[in-house]
Image (cartoon, rainbow, N blue to C red):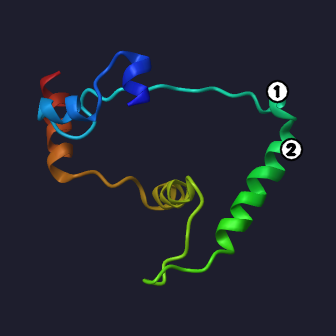
C-alpha cells in the first residue's frame, strides 16, 4: 500500500484487476541508505551479523524448517544459479525466442 501511495501506482487490488499476470503494473519504491551515515560500516556489519546469528540460532518450526534471515533464500538461489544457470519457464523462453526472431 505504501509503495502504491508513494509512487501513485497500483495497489495489490489494482494489479490483480489488470488480470495480466504476476507483477504487471507493480508499484515500486527504492530506498538507498548510506551505511556510513548510520554509524559506519563496522556498526552496520555488527548489527546485521547479530541478526543472522540470532535467527540461525532459533528453533526449527513444527515441520522442522529452520528460520531464515531476510534475503537468505535469495543468496542461496543466486549461488545455485551461478553454478547451474537460471531456470526459465519453457513457455516464456519460447516467447523470448520468437520476439528475437521477429525483432
Q: Quadrant of residue 68?
A: bottom right
SS for tag 1?
A: helix
C-alpha gap between disc 2 and disc 1: 11 Å
**Contact, mark 2 vs mark 1 (Cβ under 8 Å):** no
Task: Specify the label residue 19 is tagged with.
Answer: none
Taking depth in this image into account, of 72 and 15 the one nearest to the observer is 15
Give the crowd class for mark 2: few <14, some 14-19, many >=20 residues within 10 Å. few
Disc 1: which residue: 37
In the rendering, at what x and y percent does residue 6 appear?
A: 44, 19
Q: Is residue 14 left or right of residue 102?
A: right
- Residue lying at 63% horizontally and 26% vertically, measured from the top left: 32
Mark 1 residue crowding within 10 angstroms, few (<14) / some (14–19) / many (20+): few
Residue of label 2? 43
What percent of the width, then of the height, locates residue 71? Answer: 55, 53
Looking at the image, which is closer to me, 100 or 37?
37
Residue toward you, 54 or 72: 54
Residue 25 coordinates in the image, percent (x, y): 26, 26
- Per the image, label 2 sits on a secondary structure element best described as helix
Amino acid at each position: 500500500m505504501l509503495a502504491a501511495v508513494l509512487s501513485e501506482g497500483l495497489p495489490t487490488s489494482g494489479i490483480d484487476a489488470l488480470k495480466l499476470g504476476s507483477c504487471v503494473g507493480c508499484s515500486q519504491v527504492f530506498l538507498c541508505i548510506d551505511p556510513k551515515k548510520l554509524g559506519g560500516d563496522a556498526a552496520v556489519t555488527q548489527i546485521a551479523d547479530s541478526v543472522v546469528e540470532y535467527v540461525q540460532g532459533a528453533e526449527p518450526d513444527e515441520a522442522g524448517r529452520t528460520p531464515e534471515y531476510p534475503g537468505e533464500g535469495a543468496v542461496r538461489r543466486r549461488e545455485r544459479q551461478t553454478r547451474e544457470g537460471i531456470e526459465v519457464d519453457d513457455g516464456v523462453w519460447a516467447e523470448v525466442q520468437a520476439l528475437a526472431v521477429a525483432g
